[in-house]
Image: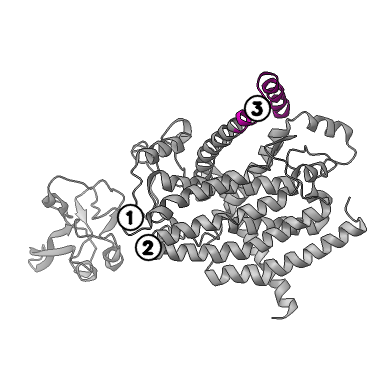
């Protein structure tokens, strides 16, 4: 079976042989855009049905089981419903910002996809500051939430947006510090270099307890950043109806919904890349036979397996823990996560300098 | 906040969160625990929990005898006047007059299934049944008489 890298490489050489370089660039950009949009659509469908099934089983329910085999086409039916619904704009809303906000949310999610390595050597853009790029762009998503909340001209929306602002601004710090732990160990910001540094073992195994602590703080921080329960104060359906997207309907609502799931996928992909080796297969020390067998599993399968494991972990949190109050949320960040991750970063730095890791 | 309390707080939080996650993981992997009843599909094999409260009924034995003495405890206990006890006088074999129920009228349309009448009853004459398909086309059909026609009180129930 050809790998993603080989397919992309052959396509590139075929295009170069038949078109001039400008057209090759344009065609490749269009192809990448179509692939990204296709991936988004598939991710939206898969993650929504996965979330509904996981939540149902964790709450001793059955979940959707009517549309298609075992209810697996439910999210497709929901999408069709959302497409045909009217996308209403309230008369008191700021029309331009109101209609712009969902697209900003989507564009941010699309931009974040650029440096993610989906398989070995298969990346849209291997930028040399990949990790910095991801953490910089991901903090832009708060703009779309604030924009939606402000433009809706609705108390619930504004309250949700303000909470989301406080939350994302504070949890960015912990997410950044946890990511820095891996950057310090790998010695590079480039995604492909970080993956290459894990060819003899994933950082979560090589880095002892400090990296495990960094992993835990990273998972908590990204759960908060993607506005999911137990940190879903921006939506908080029991107090704010739907928070910042209260006034949205139809496809504009669907875009927010999709952006949330795509963001979850991206942060999990990033977590898988940084801590679990991304497309790298599982290698244990000197077990030649075992390592060789693991190499036969395609790298894309490794990547998606790890990512979906992390997505499941985040869903597991969501359907287990109750929502935090805003003061508890900020306490958790400023009194616990931030000091812990700062001290942890110090220990990781000492480890990297003294070469205590494997 | 002392350092010791800080550290014990962190570990206590991790422990309690892990306890919750263990429980949801148990439910996630054990599908036999699912309590959803797919009602219209399993209508013939429906299993309701013991404490399910569908409507108030008065059990009668094979001699068409019930245990209701007409003490009105249920009528007094009912918060919204669902139960009305209507009396008649019966003659005992010794020729004495004895108070007995003529009709125990039960308004299903008013009932909230609060179970207070069943708890108030001193002689266990009424209980909650597990029927729940109560829709009818005429509201008057929801007013029910709980004692069967021609029934009388069981021997030995005072």
Q: Residue furthest right?
A: A354
Q: Is residue A332 magenta?
A: no
Q: Which residue is mark 3?
A: A24
A235 sits to left or right of A34: left
N-term-proximal mark, 2 vs 1: 1
Q: Are marks 1 and 3 on the same chain?
A: yes
The residues tagged by marks 2 and 1 sit, at their Cα atoms, a distance apart of: 10 Å
Q: Is residue A7 magenta?
A: yes
Between disc 2 and disc 3, the foreground one is 3
Task: Let me know if residue B98 appears in the view.
Answer: yes
Percent of width and height locating residue A274: 74, 48
What residue appears at the point 38 percent right and 45 percent down from the top-left corner?
A250
> Which element is circle 1 on?
loop
What residue appears at the point 15 percent right and 53 percent down from the top-left corner?
B144
Q: Which residue is mark 2?
A: A154
Task: Let me know if residue B36 appears in the view.
Answer: no
Q: Quadrant of the N terminus of chain A?
A: top right
Residues in magenta? A1-29
Percent of width and height locating residue A219: 66, 55
Residue A90's tag is: 1
Contact between marks 2 and 1 (CB within 8 A): the answer is yes
Q: Main secondary structure of the magenta part?
A: helix
Q: Name the foreground residue: A242 vs B128.
A: A242
The residues tagged by marks 2 and 3 sit, at their Cα atoms, a distance apart of: 48 Å
Chain under disc 1:
A
The residues tagged by marks 1 and 3 sit, at their Cα atoms, a distance apart of: 44 Å
N-term-proximal mark, 1 vs 3: 3
> Which element is circle 3 on?
helix
Q: Name the foreground residue: A228 vs A192.
A: A192
């Amino acid at each position: 079976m050809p790998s993603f890298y080989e397919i992309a490489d052959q396509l590139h050489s075929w295009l170069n042989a038949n078109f001039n370089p400008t057209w090759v660039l344009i065609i490749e950009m269009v192809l990448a855009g179509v692939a990204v949009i296709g991936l988004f659509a598939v991710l939206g469908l898969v993650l929504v049905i996965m979330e509904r099934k996981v939540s149902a089983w964790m709450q001793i329910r059955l979940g959707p089981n009517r549309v298609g085999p075992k209810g697996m086409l439910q999210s497709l039916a929901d999408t069709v419903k959302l497409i045909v619904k009217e996308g209403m704009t309230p008369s008191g809303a700021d029309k331009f910002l109101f209609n712009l906000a969902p697209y900003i949310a989507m564009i941010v999610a699309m931009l974040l996809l650029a440096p993610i390595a989906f398989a070995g050597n298969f990346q849209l853009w291997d930028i040399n500051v990949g990790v910095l790029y991801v953490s910089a762009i991901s903090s832009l998503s708060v703009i779309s939430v604030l924009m939606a909340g402000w433009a809706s001209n609705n108390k619930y929306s504004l309250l949700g947006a303000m909470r989301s602002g406080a939350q994302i601004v504070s949890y960015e710090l912990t997410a950044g510090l946890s990511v820095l732990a891996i950057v310090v160990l790998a010695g590079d910001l480039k995604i492909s270099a970080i993956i290459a540094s894990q060819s003899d073992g994933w950082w979560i195994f090589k880095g002892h307890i400090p990296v495990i602590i960094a992993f835990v703080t990273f998972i908590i921080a990204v759960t908060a950043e993607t506005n999911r329960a137990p940190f879903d104060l921006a939506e908080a359906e029991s107090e704010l109806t739907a928070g910042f997207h209260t006034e949205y309907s139809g496809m504009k609502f669907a875009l927010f919904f999709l952006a949330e799931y795509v963001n979850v996928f991206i942060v999990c992909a990033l977590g898988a890349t940084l801590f679990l080796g991304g497309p790298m297969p599982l290698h244990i020390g000197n077990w030649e036979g075992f390592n060789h067998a693991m190499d036969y599993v395609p790298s894309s399968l490794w990547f998606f397996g790890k990512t979906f494991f992390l997505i499941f972990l985040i869903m597991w949190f969501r359907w287990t823990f109750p929502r935090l109050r805003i003061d508890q949320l900020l306490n958790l960040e400023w009194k616990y996560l931030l000091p812990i991750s700062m001290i942890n970063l110090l220990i990781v730095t000492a480890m990297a300098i003294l070469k205590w890791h494997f | 906040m002392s350092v010791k309390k800080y550290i014990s707080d962190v570990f206590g939080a991790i422990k309690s969160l892990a306890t919750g996650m263990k429980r949801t993981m148990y439910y996630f992997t054990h599908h036999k625990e699912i309590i959803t009843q797919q009602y219209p599909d399993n209508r013939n094999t429906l299993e309701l929990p013991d404490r399910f409260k569908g409507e108030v009924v008065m059990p009668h034995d094979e001699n068409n005898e019930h245990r209701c003495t007409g003490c009105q405890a249920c009528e007094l206990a009912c918060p919204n006047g669902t139960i009305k006890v209507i009396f008649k006088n019966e003659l005992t074999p010794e020729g004495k007059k004895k108070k007995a129920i003529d009709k125990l009228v039960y308004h299903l349309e008013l009932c909230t299934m609060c179970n207070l009448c069943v708890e108030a009853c001193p002689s266990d004459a009424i209980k909650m049944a597990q029927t729940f398909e109560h829709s009818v086309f005429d509201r008057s059909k929801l007013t029910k008489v709980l004692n069967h026609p021609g029934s009388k009180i069981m021997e030995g129930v005072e």
